[in-house]
Structures are given as structure tokens and as C-alpha cells.
Amino acid sequence: MEQRWTTPVAQKDIRKAHVGDVVFLSGTVVTVRDAAHQKLLSLTTKSLPFTFSEAALYHCGPLVKKTGNAWTVLSAGPTTSSRMNTVEPEIIKRYGVRVIIGKGGMDTRTGQALKKHQVVYLAFPGGAGVVAADAVEHVDNVYWLDELGMTEAIWVFTVKDFGPLVVAMDSYGKTLYKK
């Protein structure tokens, strides 16, 4: 089944999503790679300049160009999600993450956190970074750019019809990666 979601994604939409469904997402997407995950573990929800429950967390290190005061996203393909396995359950619990986007899936421990907190993991096709960039309407903000560098900084994007995203791990504990 194909679904169209807008952030913040409603709980009823997450519960309607099943492994194999296709989703197109509009709204706010926040990129978070390895170093940013580690930084998030040292912070509290009160110290964050954004709210994960109102956005989708995207395992991505974008290629971005600044012209004047504006940013243009050149490529925004997913990075391998399994690198975040050791910290993702805590990030989900601490920050109220509802939607995670990445590639390659995540481990059983993260799958259990998805089920417990009713979160969905959406897979974006690897190698399609330009397709992802085309769905970015604008860059809303960037955090920790000087500290973490371009690919590890947290970027906040507004996207329209971002996808296709495949429901690879649903909120019921099902996963494409065990078939």
C-alpha cells in the first residue's frame, strides 16, 4: 500500500504502516549521522533546538553548497543505519523519535525499541542521493556545522514527497531484513 505522510506523523499513520508499504513524506526531516548521535547522547531534550517527535530522523550525511545566505542540497542519500545500532534505542526513548529513515536496516535491539515506542523505520534507496536532494524544498537550519563538519552536522530540511520510502521495520516488530 502507498501512503503519504506529513510531519509530525500521526500515531495512527505509523500503526497503519506495515512492512513492504511505500511512503512519501512531506514536512521536516533532520539528518543525524554517527557523530551527531554521540552528541545527542550528551544533551537533554530541553537543550535541543528542534523536536524529533515533530520530524523524521534521517541517517544521512548530505552534500550541501552555500550561495550567499542560502543552502542548496546537492545530494542527500542515506547512510548505513546499522552503524547507529548501539545508540538508536536510547535516542528513540530519550527524544521521542517517531520515524527513522536510512538504509540497510537495524538490529534486533533497535527493532524492539521501534515496537516498544511505536516507531517506524523507512528505507530509502541507496545510490539515489540526487533523488533525495530533489525532494528538499529548503534547508531550514544547520546545527554544529563548525564542530562536526558538513556530513556529520545536523541539517533540518523541509521536504515534499520525499521517497519512495519502504517500510522496512514496522511498529509491530516485523522487518524486511529477516525474510
Image (cartoon, rainbow, N blue to C red):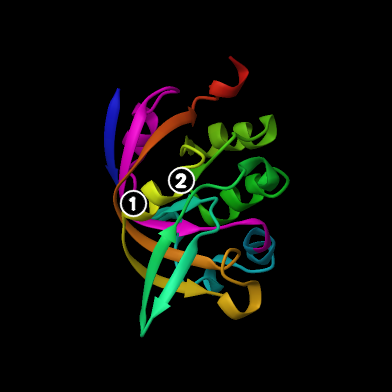
Q: Which span is picked out in magenta? A: 8-35
- Give the x, y percent position of residue 39: 66, 66
Q: Nearer the viewer, residue 19 or 126?
A: 126
Q: What element does badge 1 sit on?
A: loop
Q: Which mark is residue 98?
A: 2
In the picture of the structure, the residue carrying the numbered disc 1 is 8
- Three-letter code, disc 2: Arg
Residue in the picture at 51% in, 39% down: 126
Does any portion of residue 8 appear in the rendered image?
yes
- Residue at horizontal 67 percent and vertical 33 percent from the top: 107
Identify the mark nearer the N-term, 1 or 2.
1
Is residue 171 visible in this depiction of the protein? no
Residue pictured at 44% horizontal, 30% vertical = 167
Name the side, left or right, on which 79 lies relative to 139.
Answer: right
- The amino acid type, in three-letter code, at marker 1 is Pro
19 magenta-colored? yes
> Which label is found at residue 106?
none
Crowd band around label 2 with a 10 angstrom C-alpha radius: few (<14), some (14–19), many (20+): many
Q: Nearer the viewer, residue 133 or 86?
A: 133
